[in-house]
Each structure stands twice: as structure tokens, then as C-alpha cells.
Image (cartoon, helix red, strand yellow):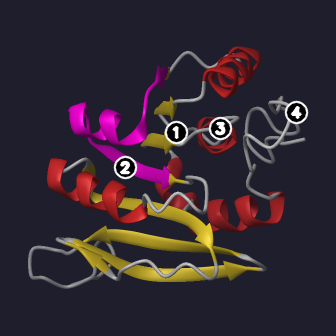
Amino acid sequence: MPRIIAGSRKKMLLRSPPGRKTRPTADRVKESIFNIISSDIADSSFLDLFAGTGQMGLEALSRDAEFCMFVEKDTGVFRVLCENISKCGFKNVECIKSDALAFLENSRRRYGIIYIDPPYDSGIYDKALNKIEEKDLLDQDGKILVEHDFNIEISGNYGILIKYREERYGNTKISFYRKRDRYGKIGLPGQL
């Protein structure tokens, strides 16, 4: 059963839909991810794409993210997602029942952190990252985190989006992307 591991809603248990409609991120993976991006969470705008139970976005809100957009297309999973959001009591959220690519195509908002966790066999990684780059949906100093099977190789760049880090946790890999700086370098904020 997924849960929130830190922050204002620490230890709150979240519902999961029955069956195998979702694949919640393991606690050890989630903890490591949030340790890596901890300095970027507070006051950020977070996009939980392919949200499932909503555990990643809810974790970000529990750790003081300013806002979270949840996107999920499956009707049953969307119902559980809305119940989890309601249970946590966060008001600074928007929850959209939509196909991820259709959402990205019509989005006008920029995000500080975008979390992409589709079904591993969906083959949608390139399309989603290309659409985020094309529509300029990432803040200048923002980060994109892509969860995928360790056997799946994702490109190192999508236009101005550059992979700057990769972490492996058993069969799970997280690829981290950010924009090139104005000099074309991959440096982190403040580094030139």
C-alpha cells in the first residue's frame, strides 16, 4: 500500500486501485528521489504525469510544494486518485482526467518539477519529453524525472532538454533532465 514518507502528511496511507492498473513507486526509490530533489521542492509547481495513486505529487505537496497538477486517464484509477487527494486535504491541486499527451499539447503552465511514470512498456517516453520541450512546459531551472525499467534506454537529449543524471534501483531507473543553460551547458542552477 503506497504511503507518504515525509513532511506534513508523513505516514499517511494511500489507496491503490484493485488489480494491476498501477505500479506504485517503491518507498526506497521514492525516498532516494526526494532526497536528490529536496532543495527544489519547497514552493515548486509539480506535475505528476501518469499520476496513478498520486503518491509522487502528494509526497511533493507534503514536503511543501506550492502546487501539484495530477494527470490520469484511467477512470477507475482517477477515482482512487481523487479519493487520495481528498484524504490528504490539500487544496493547492488540480486533477485532470486526460491522456498525458493530449494534456501536454493543451497545457499552458510551466512546472518546476515534472514526474513521468507511464507503464514501462508504453513506449511513450520520447513523445512525452519531446512534447514538454516543444511546448516549453519546464521552468528554466526545473527538472524532469522519468521512471522507467532499467532495460529501457531513453535518449540523452530532447531539443534543449538534457539528461544530466541517472540512478538505478534494482529493476527501476530514474533519468533526470533539465534545460541547457543560456550558454548551451548542462550545469545546475548557479553553475556556468
| Disc 1 residue type (three-letter) | Ala
Which dot marks residue 112? 2
Q: Residue at x 13, y 82 (%)?
A: 184
Q: Amino acid at mark 3?
A: Gly
CA gap between label 3 and label 4 equals: 15 Å
Identity of the residue furthest to the left in this view:
183
Count how many numbered circles sit on residues in the image.
4
Sequence-first disc among 3 and 1: 3
- Within 10 Å of the Cα at label 3, are there few (<14), some (14-19), or many (20+) other Cα atoms? many
Q: Three-letter amino acid code at disc 2?
A: Gly
Spatial CA distance of label 3 from label 1 is: 19 Å
Q: Which residue is mark 4?
A: 13
Q: Going from the N terminus, do you reach mark 1 or mark 2 first?
A: 1
Name the residue that disc number 1 marks.
65
Looking at the image, which residue is at 83% across and 42% down? 2
Q: Secondary structure at mark 3?
A: loop
Tell whether 72 sits left or right of 164: right
Check disc 1 and report its element: helix, strand or loop: loop
Q: Are marks 2 and 4 in contact (CB under 8 Å)?
A: no
Q: CA distance from mark 1 to mark 2?
A: 10 Å
Q: Quadrant of the C terminus?
A: bottom left
Residue 78 sits in which quadrant?
A: top right
Above or below, 89 relative to 21: above
Q: Report helix, strand or loop for mark 2.
A: strand
* Residue bearing mark 3: 52
User: Tag 4: residue type?
Assistant: Leu
Contact, mark 3 vs mark 1 (Cβ under 8 Å): no
Q: Image point 35% across, 54% down: which residue? A: 128
Mark 2 or mark 4, whichever is nearer to me: 4
Mark 1–mark 4 distance (CA, rounded to whole Å): 19 Å
SS label for mark 4: loop
At x 33% / y 33%, what residue is drawn?
103
